[in-house]
Amino acid sequence: MAINLQKGQREAINAPKFTIGLGWDTNTSSTGADFDLDASVFIVGDNKKILADEYFVFYNNLKSPDGAVEHTGDNLTGEGDGDDEQIRVDLSKIDSRVSEINVVVTIHEADARRQNFGQVRNSFIRIFDGVTNEELLKYELDEDFSIETAVEFGRIYKKDDKWKFEAIGAGMKGGLADYLKKYN
C-alpha cells in the first residue's frame, strides 16, 4: 500500500529500480491554446548543480549518461487518466557523484500561451516499484500556483548511503529558465 505524503514529508525508497509517475489535469484554457506540460529531471551533485549538461533529462535528452535515469517521452496533451509522463530510475547504475534527482514540471511556452499552474489540477508525483508495479509513495499537490509556470514536484536524495524521497511542491514563475539557473 502506498504512503500518501504531505508537503515536506520524506520517506525512504527501498526499491533499487522504480518509476516516477507524474500526472495532472488541465482546465480549459481561456486563451484557446492547448496545454503542454513537461517533466524534467535535474541530476545534481553535492554542490546542488547538474553534473554536466547530459544530466539534465527531459524530452530532448531522454537518458542520463550513466543510464540510471530515463524519461519515457513527452506527452503533448495530458489526456486520459493515470500518469501523463514517466521517468524510470535504476539506482544501481547511478553515477557515484550524484546526491539528488530533482523532478520539475513546466508548462511549455507558458508566457506565450498565458498559462500557469493555477489552471492545472489533480497534480501528483508517485513512485512505484519497477519490478512489481506496486505503488510505494504518492504526493498530491494541493497548492494553488496562480502565477507559477514551473513546479518542483519532488526530489530523490541520498543521505547516509540511503535514498529517500521528499515531497517539495514549490513553484517558480520564470518557468524552466528559473530551474536551469538554480541547478546550472
Image: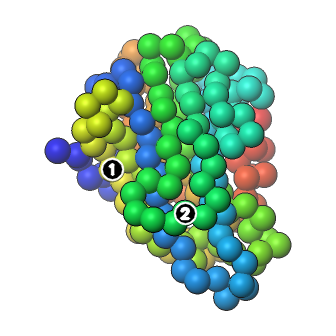
**Where residue 69 sits: x, y (%)?**
55, 28
Q: What amino acid type is highlighted by mark number 1?
A: Lys
- Which residue, given by chain and number where applicable, does mark 2 sit on? 78
**Where residue 110 sits: x, y (%)?**
74, 68
SS at circle 1: strand
- Which residue, given by chain and number where applicable, does mark 1 sit on? 138
The Cα atoms of the two marked residues, 2 and 1, are separated by: 19 Å
Q: Quadrant of the N terminus?
A: top left
Is 159 located above or below residue 8 in the figure?
above
> What residue is shown at x 22% (from left), y 46% (from top)?
2
Residue 146 shows up from this direction: yes
Answer left or right for 134 relative to 174.
left
> What residue is shown at x 44% (from left), y 13% (from top)?
92
User: Earlier along the polypeptide chain: callout 2 or callout 1?
Assistant: 2
In which image quadrant can residue 98 be found?
A: top right
Q: What amino acid type is highlighted by mark number 2?
A: Gly
In which image quadrant can residue 64 be found?
A: top right
